[in-house]
Image (cartoon, rainbow, N blue to C red):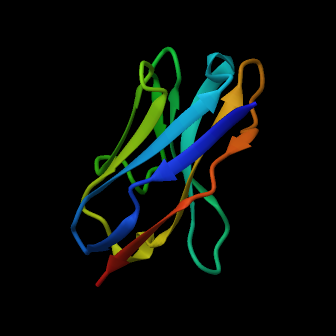
Amino acid sequence: QVQLVESGGGLVQTGGSLRLSCAASGRTFSIDTMGWFRRAPGKEREFVASISWFGGSTKYANSVKGRFSISRDNAKNTLYLQMNSLKPEETAQYYCAATPRGRAEYSYWGQGTQVTVSS
């Protein structure tokens, strides 16, 4: 099992920045990919970004390319999401998630951290 705990959410003005963190514990050696997702009020959960835990390759949703940056610190077992130029429509609960090696679906999820962007 892998446990994930997000932090770093909060209230920020339009155009501002936040950095989210996700601390992983447990069987972290079994992680293949980690990602960030978000769910806005009344909307479905959507993919934001992902990173290969050991290789470091990244993917981004088109809506965040050039503004968000995903990274990880393997020594600290921590995932990050640097968010710049935030928009009000990006107000959402942000979740980190992880896939086990050999599996494509995200099996492990954190409890989420709230990001609110004021206009």
Residue 44 falls left or right of residue 54: right
Residue at far front of view: 26
Along the line of sight, the residue nearer the viewer: 111 or 48: 111
Q: Residue at x 25, y 74 (%)?
A: 14
Q: Residue at x 40, y 74 (%)?
A: 116
Q: Is residue 97 visible?
A: no
Q: Is residue 82 visible?
A: yes
Residue 75 falls left or right of residue 26: left
Residue 81 percent coordinates (x, y): 39, 45
User: Based on the displayed image, in which of its 4 quarters is residue 84 positioned?
Assistant: bottom left
Residue 80 position (above or below residue 27): below
Residue 49 falls left or right of residue 45: left
Residue 100 percent coordinates (x, y): 72, 25
User: Based on the displayed image, in which of its 4 quarters is residue 4 positioned?
Assistant: top right
Residue 86 falls left or right of residue 7: left
Residue 54 percent coordinates (x, y): 51, 15
Q: Quadrant of the C terminus?
A: bottom left
Along the line of sight, the residue nearer the viewer: 38 or 75: 75
Q: Residue at x 53, y 24 (%)?
A: 52
Residue at far bottom of view: 119
Q: How many marks?
A: 0
Residue 26 position (above or below residue 64): above
Residue 105 position (above or below residue 39): above
Q: Residue at x 53, y 22 (%)?
A: 53
Residue 106 percent coordinates (x, y): 72, 39
Q: Quadrant of the N terminus?
A: top right
Along the line of sight, the residue nearer the viewer: 23 or 57: 23
